[in-house]
Amino acid sequence: MSKPDETGRGRSGVSRRAFLKGSGAAAAATAMTGAPGLEAEAQGAEPVAGLTTITLTVNGTPHKVEVEPRTTLLEALRMGLNLTGAKPISVDGASGGSLVLVDDKPTSANTVLAMDMVGKKIVTVESLISGDRVDAVPMAFVHHDASQCGFCTPGFIIAVKAFLAKNPKATEAEIRAGLNGNLCRCGTYANIIPAVLEVVKGGGNG
């Protein structure tokens, strides 16, 4: 049996030290030149496409925003247009915190893709609380202290606005059923219901 020399050189003529050194350099080079892409390819995933500029009509104004095919409407609103009213509370929209109006229908912005919203009319809570006249719904929420921490409030306001547009004379029971899809960790439901009833009685929900 041949005896390896001090550097660990065997029959192949390559020492263990040289082999390890070369392997380390190769690993470093791979990490610097796109290891994530290689990993995705190995898993059969398609590479993420580049940014695309689209136009979203939000609160009556067209806005150009850069998105990826996977960008949600919520991400486009919050990061692309700095409209942070809709909140990323739940990934499946179960909390109602990311609600906006899309063609007058309440829609969880984190469950739809921004690219699919091109050509649609998007309304966010910002349109109801800005300008010279604040909408009756947020005003009623303030009057009845129905916000507390305020994190879920924008979703509730949008839900109420959409619900009362179809049910302007809603009863308390109908309001409770209509807002069943919105959750509040602070538990301000006892104040939200009177706030909505105030709008119904005041007729300012048009």
Image: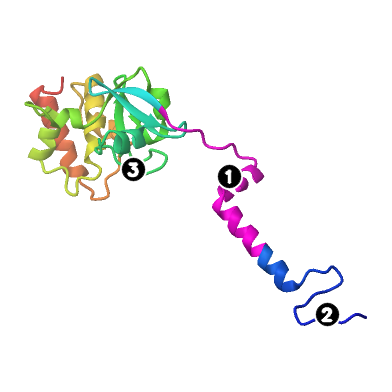
Q: Please state the extent of the stretch shown in magenta in the rendering.
A: 23-52
- What residue type is disc 1 on? Gly
Against 78, residue 25 (above or below) is below
Task: Return the x and y of residue 149 as percentages of the image width and height.
Answer: 19, 49
Write down the residue under mark 2.
4
Against 129, residue 150 (above or below) is below
| Residue beneath the point at 36% across and 17% down | 119
- What residue type is disc 3 on? Pro
Element class at badge 2: loop
* Image disc number at residue 104: none
- Counting residues from the start of the chain, the first of labels 2 and 3 encountered is 2
Write down the residue under mark 1.
37
Q: Are marks 2 and 1 in contact (CB under 8 Å)?
A: no
**Is any part of residue 180 visible from this angle?**
no
| Residue beneath the point at 25% across and 29% down | 124
Foreground pick, 155 / 124: 124
Q: Quadrant of residue 182?
A: top left
Say whether residue 148 is left or right of residue 34.
Answer: left
Q: Quadrant of the C terminus?
A: top left
Task: Return the x and y of residue 34 as percentages of the image width and height.
Answer: 56, 48
- Counting residues from the start of the chain, the first of labels 2 and 1 encountered is 2
How packed mark 3 is, by other alpha carbons closer than 10 Å (few <14, some 14-19, many 20 or more), is many
| Residue beneath the point at 13% across and 37% down | 141
Write down the residue under mark 3.
88
Task: Return the x and y of residue 92 as percentages of the image width and height.
Answer: 42, 39
Element class at badge 3: loop
Element class at badge 1: helix
How packed mark 2 is, by other alpha carbons closer than 10 Å (few <14, some 14-19, many 20 or more), is few
- Counting residues from the start of the chain, the first of labels 1 and 3 encountered is 1
Foreground pick, 32 / 200: 32
